[in-house]
Image: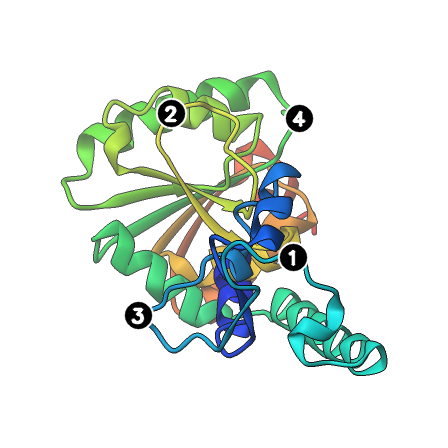
């Protein structure tokens, strides 16, 4: 969930500054005019307004709270925000949501190392990207994890990048500059958990422990996994 949406939801029933009040003006002058408690709407029951238009900047008691109560209120709200930020969605649910967003019943995932172990692997990844994007009919989706190395070579050579997707952590972008990003996770561990549940077919080139984990998870979930063994690494059972 986007952070600003979380804040708005948590503050729906809290007092709101009147948009024309002196307090709201002070926040705007500091460049903080986008804070959720300034987004008051008189037509919605978002709690009571404080500071009527034209009144001087009010002290903390204008919120109807003593300093100690205000501190407790702040701490409890902060705890809720941290809990929401740290909440992890079920990877299977995330994968199902992403699949619906891609609009595809067939998802082919490409797994690989971030660095080439063999010079042949770059040419192999490039050839796969070109061939699969031409041979597999729409709406088959091609999915990478937006990393350099073989993933970049695969992506750069796709002939139909409208079907190319990259699973990336929130706030990050893919490396290749082509295709569409799918922000879906907080870190690499969560990314692997989603990737291992998303595809119907997996093709691997080289790979380290992360690729081995994704491929094993995919196989456990009934996907077809095709490791290109001659590339070495996890694809040849190293991990």
Label 4 neighbour load within 10 Å: few <14, some 14-19, many 20+: some
Label 3 neighbour load within 10 Å: few <14, some 14-19, many 20+: few
Say which of marks 4 and 3 sits in front: 3
Q: Are marks 4 and 3 in contact (CB under 8 Å)?
A: no
Could you say where residue 158 lies in the image, as x and y percent from the top left? 31, 25
Quarter occupied by residue 74: bottom right
Distance from label 1 to label 2 (Cα)? 24 Å
Q: Which residue is mark 1?
A: 189
Residue at the spot x=28%, y=54% of the render? 101
Q: Which residue is mark 2?
A: 178
The correct choice, above or below, for 132 with respect to 221 in the image is above
Distance from label 2 to label 3 (Cα)? 44 Å
Could you say where residue 114 lies in the image, as x and y percent from the top left? 63, 32
Q: Which residue is mark 3?
A: 43
- Tell me which numbered mark, 1 or 4, is placed earlier along the sequence: 4
Question: Number of labelled discs?
Answer: 4
- Tell me which numbered mark, 1 or 2, is placed earlier along the sequence: 2
Distance from label 4 to label 3 (Cα)? 62 Å
Distance from label 1 to label 4 (Cα)? 23 Å
SS class of the residue under badge 1?
A: helix
Looking at the image, which is closer to me, 40 or 125?
40
Residue at the spot x=68%, y=80% of the render? 64
């Amino acid at each position: 969930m986007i952070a600003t949406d979380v804040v708005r939801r948590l503050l729906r029933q809290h007092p709101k500054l009147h948009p024309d009040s002196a307090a709201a003006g002070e926040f705007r002058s500091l460049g903080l005019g986008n804070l959720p408690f300034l987004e008051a709407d008189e037509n919605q029951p978002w709690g009571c307004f404080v500071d009527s238009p034209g009144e001087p900047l009010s002290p903390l008691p204008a919120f109807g709270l003593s300093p100690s109560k205000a501190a407790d209120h702040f701490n409890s709200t902060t705890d809720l925000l941290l809990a929401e930020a740290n909440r992890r969605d079920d990877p299977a649910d995330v994968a199902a949501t992403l699949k619906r967003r891609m609009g595809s019943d067939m998802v082919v995932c490409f797994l690989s190392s971030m660095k080439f172990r063999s010079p042949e692997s770059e040419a192999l990844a490039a050839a796969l990207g070109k061939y699969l994007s031409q041979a597999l009919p729409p709406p088959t989706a091609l999915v990478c994890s937006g990393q350099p190395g073989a993933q970049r070579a695969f992506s750069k050579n796709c002939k139909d990048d409208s079907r190319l997707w990259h699973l990336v952590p929130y706030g990050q972008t893919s490396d290749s500059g082509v295709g569409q990003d799918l922000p879906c996770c907080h870190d690499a561990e969560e990314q692997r958990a989603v990737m291992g549940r998303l595809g119907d077919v997996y093709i691997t080139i080289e790979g380290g422990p992360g690729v081995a984990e994704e491929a094993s998870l995919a196989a456990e979930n009934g996907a077809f996994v095709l490791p290109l063994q001659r590339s070495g690494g996890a694809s040849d059972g190293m991990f």
